[in-house]
Image (cartoon, rainbow, N blue to C red):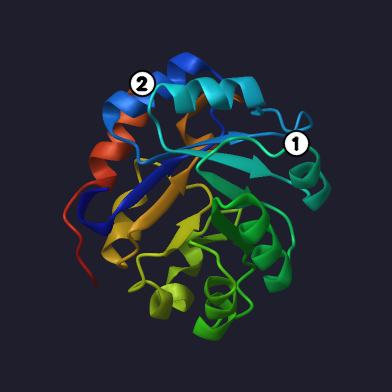
Amino acid sequence: MQNDEIVKICGIARLQDASFAMDLGYDIIGVILDETVPRHGTVDLLENIKDMGATTAAVYTSLESVDHDLASADYIQLHFNHTAEQIKSLKSKSGKGIISVLKYGGNGITESDIGERLNAGADLVLVENREGIVKFLDGLRPLSGNPRIGVAGKIGPSNVGTIRKFGFRFIDASSSLEISPGKKDHSRMKEFIEAARCQHATV
C-alpha cells in the first residue's frame, strides 16, 4: 500500500469491476455477503477476486452470517454492532484481518472508543455515516492521524479531497462509484482513486 494510504472499494458484485479496480490500484476490494443488500456479491465471486491476486474483504452484516459461512478473504469486515470480545473471538478463530465498522451519528467519539477495538485485535477501524461522513469531519479530526482509522459514507470524487485534507489515509467508497446498485462506473472509479491518491495534507 502506498505511503500508509488505504483506498478501499466496497460493494463489488461483478468480476469485471473487481478487475478494473485492481488495475487502478485499489488496495482492498470488498464484497458484501448478504443477499438482502442490493450490491451484494457471493463467496465464489470473492474467491475469484482473491485468486486474481487482490486483497479482499468479506463484508458481513450479522455475527450469525460470519459463523455460518466464513469466506477465504484477507479481511473480515464486521458491518454490524459488535463487541471487543467478538473481535477477539473472530480474530482468533479465523486468523484473518479484522475491519471493525463503527456507525457514527455525530454524538461524540473518543480515541479510547477506537482503541478498545484496536486493542481487541481489529486491524482497521472504519467510522461510517451512511448519510455522509464529510459533515462530521471536524469532530473526527483527533482520529485522523492514525492510519488504521478510516472513514466511509457518501465519499466520492467530488469530496475525497476534503477527506484527505483532514488527514485520513484510510478511505472506503461504495455507492458513490455506482451506475446502479452492484454495477460500478469505471470512469468514476478512476476519477476517485486519482483524487484519493493526491498528496496527504492537513488543514
Q: Residues within 10 Å of mark 2 (few under 14, many from 20)?
A: some
Q: Which residue is mark 1?
A: 69
Residue at x 61%, y 53% (from the top left corner)? 131
- Say which of marks 2 and 1 sits in front: 1
Secondary element type, mark 2: helix
Residue 60, above or below 128:
above
Extreme residue toward the left, this view: 199
Q: Is residue 150 left or right of residue 24?
A: right
For the C terminus, the image quarter is bottom left
Which quadrant of the view contains residue 148?
A: bottom left
Residue at x 38%, y 56% (from the top left corner)? 170
- Residue 23 in the image: x percent, y percent? 29, 24
- Residue 88 in the image: x percent, y percent? 65, 67
Residue at x 40%, y 80% (from the top left corner)? 142
Which quadrant of the view contains residue 186?
A: top left
Q: Is residue 140 visible?
A: yes
Residue 83, above or below 150:
below
- Residue 96 in the image: x percent, y percent? 55, 50
Residue at x 50%, y 68% (from the top left corner)? 136
Q: Is residue 185 visible?
A: no
- Gap between marks 2 and 1, in whole Å? 27 Å
Q: Residues within 10 Å of mark 1 (few under 14, many from 20)?
A: few
Which badge, 2 or 1, is on the more N-terminal residue?
2
Q: Are marks 2 and 1 in contact (CB under 8 Å)?
A: no
The number of callouts visible is 2
Q: Which residue is mark 2?
A: 20
91 or 149: which is nearer to us?
A: 91
For badge 1, the amino acid type reads Asp
Q: Is residue 43 left or right of residue 149?
A: right
Secondary element type, mark 1: loop
For badge 2, the amino acid type reads Phe
